[in-house]
Image (cartoon, helix red, strand yellow):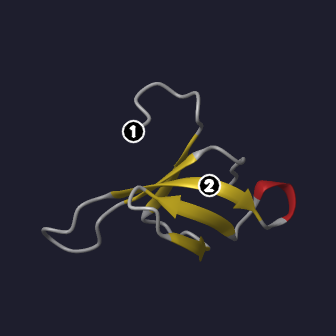
C-alpha cells in the first residue's frame, strides 16, 4: 500500500450493516509512502492506522473520491 498526504483512505465495513468510513491521510509515517498513516475521519477523530486488506487508498485527485 502506498499513499501521500492528502489522499483518502476508504475503510470498508467489516460486518453487515456497518458503513464504509472515509479518512484523510494527514501524515505518512512509514518510508516511501508505506504505513502507518495518521488519518482524520469525517467526524474529526484522528488515529494512527496500518490499513488492512479491507482498505483502499484513493489519490486526492482521482475521480469518484468521496470528500
Mark 2 surroundings: few (<14), some (14-19) or many (≥20) residues within 10 A = many
* Residue displayed at 72% across by 59% down: 27
| Residue found 59% across the figure and 73% down from its top | 49
For residue 51, what is the image quadrant? bottom right
Q: Secondary structure at mark 2?
A: strand
Gap in angstroms between the C-alphas marked 1 and 2: 13 Å
Number of numbered discs: 2
Q: Residue at x 85, y 55 (%)?
A: 32
Neighbourhood count class around disc 1 (C-alpha, 10 Å): few under 14, some 14–19, many 20 upward: few
Q: Which mark is residue 42?
A: none
Q: Is residue 48 above or below residue 43?
A: below
Q: Is residue 41 left or right of residue 24?
A: left
Q: Position of residue 28 (x, y in %)?
A: 75, 60
Above or below: residue 26 compared with residue 54: above
- Give the SS element for disc 1: loop
What residue lies at 46% left-to-right and 24% top-to-bottom?
63
Q: Residue furthest front?
A: 44
Q: Looking at the image, is 33 positioned above or below residue 64?
A: below
Which residue in the rendered view is the most extreme toward the left?
17
> Between disc 1 and disc 2, whose residue precedes?
2
Q: Position of residue 14 (x, y in %)?
A: 29, 72
Residue 19 is situated, as x and y percent measured from the top left of the image, at 23, 61
Q: Quadrant of the N terminus?
A: bottom right
Asked if the residue at tag 2 contacts the one at tag 1, i.e. Cβ–Cβ closer than 8 Å, the answer is no
Q: Is residue 21 left or right of residue 59?
A: left
Quarter-wise, where is residue 46 in the image? bottom right
Residue named by callout 1: 66
- In the picture, the quarter occupied by the C terminus is top left
Q: Up-down: is 50 above or below 39? A: below
Q: Which residue is label 2 attached to?
A: 25
Amino acid at each position: 500500500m502506498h499513499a501521500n498526504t492528502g489522499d483518502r483512505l476508504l475503510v470498508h465495513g467489516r460486518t453487515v450493516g456497518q458503513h464504509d468510513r472515509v479518512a484523510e491521510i494527514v501524515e505518512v509515517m512509514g518510508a516511501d509512502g508505506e504505513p502507518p498513516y495518521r488519518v482524520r475521519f469525517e467526524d474529526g477523530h484522528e488515529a494512527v492506522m496500518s490499513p488492512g486488506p479491507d482498505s483502499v487508498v484513493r489519490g486526492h485527485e482521482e475521480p469518484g473520491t468521496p470528500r
